[in-house]
């Protein structure tokens, strides 16, 4: 009788009927005190049919059988059948406080009740309050904020500011970088997977300081020489700026080699350029050791761009720079209809307060370090894991068919993703070859969640 009861409980927990031996082998998802309300909306099949007819064919989805996600709470998501999943991707490193965090939701609702939109041509305290709080999290003279609606918009604006301020057009980016999919940012992006055949001028792509696949390993200063050579041989000797992520997200959670950014900063400054730190994915406490990714390299940028975690899922981005540099936008009219929207900025301010109140940066460091150690141990067990990297709760696991040749194991990565989904874990993927698991969960992730995640990945890899 006891075994029958356990079998039924396990079947309910995993959302499908399975035999007792199979259930006994599965790791247990940590308990969670929340039950979503019954879902009465369209099925996954209905939605797929409508998407195929009315949405752009460029939109893609994960998994052979796409998930219909209808509810979320903190680090968990729920499908149309009420089945719970551990979210280790957070909507592409976006949900930092947790899905539907009550304090963020309350701020959004309260602001929506009194004013949804006014534009910045009128006064409203929400945008100023959030700008002040955001500036307090940045070093040096970085205290002037321009709000946008996305990371792409933020990077577009940052590149334009650099060009206006310096009077130069040339910008240096990194190979393997991703900075957005608009006109300027597509030029700065350096993976053909994300680039259309349209005019993309004035951007030079330097060697990527990738400690795992790069030609100089972890020697950041050797990679930095390529930037100086680009300045010497590919420009007039003067440049507008240099843009980079401290940890490449779409590129496969690649943390730049130590010593690289300080050396590059010297070359860029000497050439009259500005440094743009793209913190769209690596900012807002996700690195754990620091609030911003660039801080781990001991540098202070001239411009910082951000989005994703800034609003915990609300469409919101920002560019932060110095008062002097910010003056260039007064030469003409610069305007963004929805940038600084009161609902979005109220949400952003609530996010900052939750990050501090719940000490989520500390949690990202402690839990992220624990998770990385467990993944390193998994690497010793499974030959297919070529590299484990990243910091805090921005981690990457790269799968390779051959450790010596570092042959990308893309098909295997897709198979493991599907297997993990079947056991209740959602994880992202990325990297130029599509063979890297992107582990970027909400910052409320726990050690128990980490154990469940690694145990599920272990079983999935064992079935290859």
Image: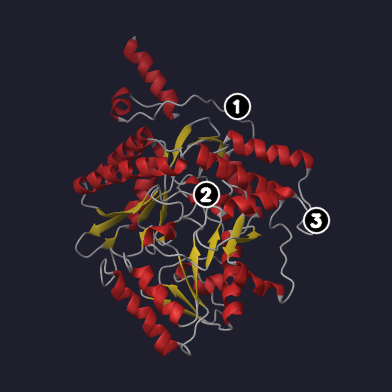
- Name the residue at 26% across, 69% down: 219
Q: Quadrant of the N terminus?
A: top left
Instruction: Report the colour scheme.
Output: secondary structure
Q: Is residue 401 above or below residue 452?
A: below
Q: Position of residue 299 (x, y in %)?
A: 42, 65
Q: CA distance from mark 2 to mark 3?
A: 29 Å
Labels in figure, total: 3
Which of disc 3 and disc 2 is earlier in sequence?
Answer: 2
Give the image location of residue 383, x and y in percent: 20, 51
Question: Which numbered disc covers residue 37?
Answer: 1
Tell me whether circle 2 and circle 1 mark residues in contact (CB < 8 Å): no
45 on left or right of 255: right
Q: Tell me the element at label 2.
A: loop
Residue marked by disc 2: 94
Residue 431 or residue 95, whichever sits in front: 95
Residue 100 appearing in the image: yes
The mark nearer the N terminus, 2 or 1, is 1
Q: Residue furthest top?
A: 1
Residue 109 figure quarter:
top right
């Amino acid at each position: 009788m006891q075994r029958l009861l356990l079998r039924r409980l396990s079947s309910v927990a995993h959302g499908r009927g399975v035999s007792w031996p199979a259930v006994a082998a599965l790791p247990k998802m940590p308990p969670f005190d929340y039950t979503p309300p019954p879902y009465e909306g369209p099925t996954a099949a209905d939605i797929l049919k409508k998407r195929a007819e009315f949405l752009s064919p460029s939109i893609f989805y994960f998994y052979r059988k796409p998930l219909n996600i209808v509810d979320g709470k903190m680090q968990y998501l729920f499908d149309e059948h009420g089945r719970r999943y551990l979210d280790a991707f957070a909507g592409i490193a976006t949900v930092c406080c947790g899905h539907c965090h009550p304090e963020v939701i309350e701020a959004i609702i309260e602001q929506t009740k009194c004013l949804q939109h006014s534009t910045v041509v009128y006064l409203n305290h929400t945008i100023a309050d959030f700008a002040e709080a955001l500036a307090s999290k940045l070093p040096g003279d970085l205290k002037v904020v321009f709000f946008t609606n996305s990371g792409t918009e933020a990077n577009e604006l940052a590149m334009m500011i650099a060009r206006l301020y310096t009077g130069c057009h040339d910008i240096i980016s990194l190979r393997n970088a991703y900075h957005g999919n608009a006109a300027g940012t597509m030029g700065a992006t350096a993976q053909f997977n994300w680039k259309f055949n349209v005019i993309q001028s004035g951007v030079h792509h330097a060697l990527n300081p990738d400690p795992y696949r790069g030609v100089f390993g972890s020697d950041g200063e050797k990679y930095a020489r390529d930037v100086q050579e680009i300045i010497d041989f590919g420009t007039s000797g003067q440049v507008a700026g240099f843009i980079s992520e401290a940890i490449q997200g779409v590129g496969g959670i690649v943390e730049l080699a130590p010593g690289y950014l300080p050396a590059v900063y010297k070359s860029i400054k000497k050439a009259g350029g500005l440094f743009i730190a793209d913190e769209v994915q690596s900012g807002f406490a996700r690195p754990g050791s620091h609030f911003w990714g660039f801080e781990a390299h001991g540098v202070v940028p001239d411009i910082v761009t951000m989005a994703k975690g800034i609003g915990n899922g609300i469409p919101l981005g920002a560019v932060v720079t110095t008062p002097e540099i910010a003056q260039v936008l007064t030469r003409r009219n610069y305007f963004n209809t929805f940038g600084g929207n009161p609902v979005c900025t109220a949400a952003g301010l609530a996010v900052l307060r939750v990050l501090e109140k719940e000490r989520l940066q500390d949690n990202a460091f402690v839990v992220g370090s624990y998770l990385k150690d467990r993944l390193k141990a998994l690497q010793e067990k499974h030959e297919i894991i070529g590299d484990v990297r990243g910091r805090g709760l921005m981690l990457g696991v790269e799968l390779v068919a051959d450790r010596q040749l570092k042959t990308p194991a893309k098909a295997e990565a897709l198979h493991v993703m599907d297997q993990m989904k079947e056991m209740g874990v959602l994880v992202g993927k990325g990297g130029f070859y599509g063979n890297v698991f992107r582990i970027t969960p909400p910052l409320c992730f726990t050690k128990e969640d980490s154990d469940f995640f690694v145990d599920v990945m272990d079983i999935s890899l064992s079935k290859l």
